[in-house]
Image (cartoon, grey):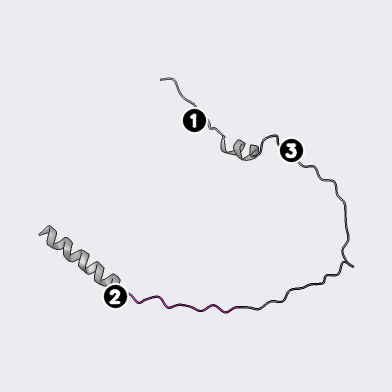
Amino acid sequence: MKAILTLLFVLIIGVTAQAQDAPVDVKVETIKTTIVTSTSYENVRLESKTKVARLYKYKNSRIKKALSFTTKRNKAKMA
């Protein structure tokens, strides 16, 4: 009886899955843009600011430091 019910359930699910409407292809509207070839530098003001940057000896030291954090619960306890 269980096998018959399982078979009927699978058949009903299969039939309902095939009865769904097929998705309709939606066309996308394209937008044409132009390319600007000339630029004017009249209103551009160049400013020189001195900024401090950190130099790390190893490539991913900030990421490795962030990923290697430990909490108090990570430490082993004596039984």
Q: CB of mark 2 within 8 Å of CB of mark 3? A: no
Magenta residues span 19-30
Q: Earlier in the sequence, mark 2 or mark 3?
A: 2
Which mark lies nearer to you, 2 or 1? 2
Q: Position of residue 69 (x, y in %)?
A: 57, 34
Quarter of the rendering containing residue 57? top right
Name the residue located 13 percent from the left edge and 58 percent from the top edge.
2
| Residue drawn at (22%, 69%) of the image | 12
Other-residue count near label 3 (Cα within 10 Å), few / some / many at <14 / 14–19 / ≥20: few
Alpha carbon of mark 3 to alpha carbon of mark 1: how far?
31 Å
Which residue position holds label 3?
Answer: 55
Mark 1: which amino acid? Answer: Asn
Tag on residue 74? 1
Count the marks: how many? Answer: 3
* Residue 4 position in % (x across, y down): 12, 62
Is 17 rendered above or below residue 3? below
The disc placed on residue 7 is: none
Look at label 2 and name its amino acid. Ala
Q: Is residue 34 left or right of residue 48?
A: left
Q: Secondary structure at mark 1?
A: helix
Where is residue 48? Give x, y as percent: 87, 51
Task: Say left or right for 65 vs 41.
Answer: left
Q: Identify the mark at residue 19; answer none if there is no mark.
A: 2
Say which element carries label 3: loop
Magenta span: predominant SS is loop
Q: Earlier in the sequence, mark 2 or mark 1?
A: 2
* Dot 2 alpha-carbon crowd within 10 angstroms: few under 14, some 14 to 19, many 20 or more: few
Name the one closer to the observer, 39 or 45.
39
Question: With respect to residue 53, does 36 lie above or below?
Answer: below
Left or right: 34, with 15 as reference point:
right
